[in-house]
């Protein structure tokens, strides 16, 4: 009989135990959900910051692309100006050579022609180098500005 009383008490404890286990499981589940909620919130904030950074970078890339296009137009204009200078120098030298009466005048015309072409090359080369330098560094400058540095 003592054995059956012990068995009855164990059955009673086991009957009560699931309710206790359910409360413990419920508390553990709630704690896990609270902890899981925190990273989700900070993850959302991180996603928001990443989206803002992406938008700023995209905006910077558009500005950078527009600036590069303007620099490319300037480079094309420099080459056109250089070609015009060379064509004009060639025309002037041809006309001067036709008017030259002596070998000395021909040498003067050739000297002036070479000097003018070299000066044009130096002037336009300087403009070309400045434009190319701006074009090469502009994307990095725009990205630095977008980051806020």
Image (tube, grey):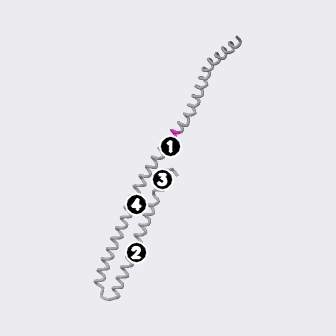
The residues colored magenta run 43-48
Asked if 56 appears above or below 135 in the picture, the reply is above
Where residue 87 sits: x, y (%)?
A: 32, 73
* C-alpha span from label 3 to label 1: 16 Å
Furthest-top residue in this view:
1
Q: Residues within 10 Å of mark 2 (few under 14, many from 20)?
A: few
Give the residue number, with chain letter if any, for mark 3: 143
Whether label 4 touches label 3, CB < 8 Å: no
Q: Is residue 17 left or right of residue 129?
A: right
Residue 119, disc: 2
Q: Earlier in the sequence, mark 4 or mark 3?
A: 4
| Element type where label 4 sits in the image | helix
Q: Quadrant of residue 129?
A: bottom left
Going 69% across and 15% down the picture, which residue do you hit? Answer: 6
Give the residue number, with chain letter if any, for mark 1: 49
Going 42% across and 53% down the picture, which residue do you hit? Answer: 63
Residue 66, disc: none
Overall secondary structure of the magenta stretch?
helix
Q: Earlier in the sequence, mark 1 or mark 4?
A: 1
Give the residue number, with chain letter if any, for mark 4: 71
């Amino acid at each position: 009989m003592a054995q059956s009383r012990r068995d009855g008490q164990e059955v009673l404890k086991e009957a009560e135990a699931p309710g206790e286990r359910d409360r413990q499981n419920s508390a553990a589940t709630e704690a896990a959900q609270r902890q899981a909620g925190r990273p989700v919130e900070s993850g959302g904030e991180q996603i928001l910051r990443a989206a803002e950074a992406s938008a700023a970078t995209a905006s910077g890339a558009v500005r950078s692309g527009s600036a590069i296009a303007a620099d490319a137009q300037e480079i094309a204009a420099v080459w056109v100006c250089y070609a015009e200078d060379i064509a004009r120098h060639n025309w002037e030298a041809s006309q001067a050579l036709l008017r030259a009466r002596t070998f000395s005048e021909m040498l003067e015309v050739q000297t002036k022609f070479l000097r003018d072409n070299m000066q044009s090359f130096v002037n336009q080369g300087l403009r070309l180098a400045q434009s190319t330098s701006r074009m090469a560094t502009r994307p990095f400058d725009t990205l630095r500005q977008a980051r806020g540095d």
